[in-house]
Amino acid sequence: MQISRLAAASTFTLPLFWATKLAATSSWSAAPIVQNSQQPFLFAPNMTRGAVISLSHGGGPMPVLGDPAHKEIIRSLKTRVPEILRLNTDEQPRAIVIVTAHWSERRPTISNGIKHKLYYDYGGFPPESYRLKYDAMGSPDVAKEIGDALSSAGFEPVFDSERGWDHGVFIPMLLINPSANVPIVQMSVLSSEDASEHYRMGQALSKLRDSNVAIIGSGFASFHNLRLMFSGISSDPAFQARNAAWNKAITEAVSEPDVEKRGELLSKWRDFPGAFEMHPLHGAEHFLPLIVCAGAGGAGEPGKYTDEFIGLDMYSYYWR
């Protein structure tokens, strides 16, 4: 199956200023290439409810390359996220569904292969960036459960056993779970960018949590406007204030404990202060995984944490 035009258009290319830093910083080194033999995952029916987290996955492979600008994101992916997901405990999830910002399709599309290659959807990085391995298994069974849940909610899901896992999946997972002992199912966002539909998708996915399937929304909700990001505007105090107002509006919306009210608030996210500056028109793909997670989170307020990146606070939200 060929990669869709929309998916291919999202390829992340190393900007010049990062390329210069990368070449000049001799202390950088790639994380060890991970290729673990699979251990069978034994699921005990302990009724642990799978966690949901919307996280910031960083720029291209930079977190795995050890970019100093990503140090707080790296730390959270290595420490906070595994704890939230209960990895390496008796309550470890039986599978993880990852809704990735780097895959946009007209209908919700689900990876359903037993194994998936990696899709290095970035350009201009060191050779080791294209030799990274993440050897987790897929899960056709969980993919079917996702498809059934979405179909019951009125969606028409599509299965894809060919597309590789993109860097919205394997880059954070190399840091979150380097042992690769939990099966992964990758899922697209919708090219329509319809907020209400993404929220409904999350609500449909929430039933999988009851059988200890965790859900990750892999994006960059606080700020993903590459033109502005690479202009250096993030050091401008006026822009920082606008970004803070934007983050405040997001946090208030996702923290609404009533599920229906939360969905209504998020359906109007384009009216939040600074929305088009933080995520340009037709460029909402890095915000949409948060909406899916907010739908999957259920009633109650989420936990949250922030990571400093390029002078801004990047918010992640989670439900357990």
Image: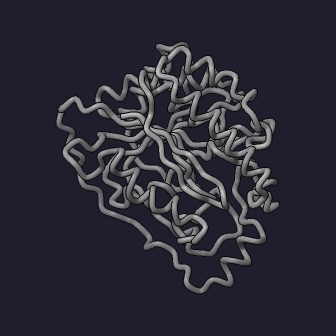
Q: Quadrant of the C terminus?
A: top left
Give left or right: position of 66 versus 274.
left
Q: Position of residue 177 (x, y in %)?
A: 37, 56
- The answer to which quarter of the image holds residue 233 is bottom right
- The answer to which quarter of the image holds residue 3 is top right
Q: Is residue 161 visible?
A: no
Q: Is residue 7 visible?
A: yes
Residue depicted at 50% across the width and 66% down the height = 132
Q: Position of residue 60 (x, y in %)?
A: 62, 60
Give left or right: position of 249 versus 218.
right
Q: Quadrant of the N terminus?
A: top right
Considering depth in this image, is 6 or 284 the residue closer to the camera? 284
Question: How many numbered circles does the render carry?
Answer: 0
- The answer to which quarter of the image holds residue 308 is bottom right
Residue depicted at 71% across the width and 27% down the height = 192
Considering depth in this image, is 242 or 283 the residue closer to the camera? 242
Q: Position of residue 99 (x, y in %)?
A: 53, 39
Q: Is residue 121 above or below residue 251?
A: below
Q: Is residue 155 above or below residue 25?
A: above
Q: Is residue 116 above or below residue 283?
A: below
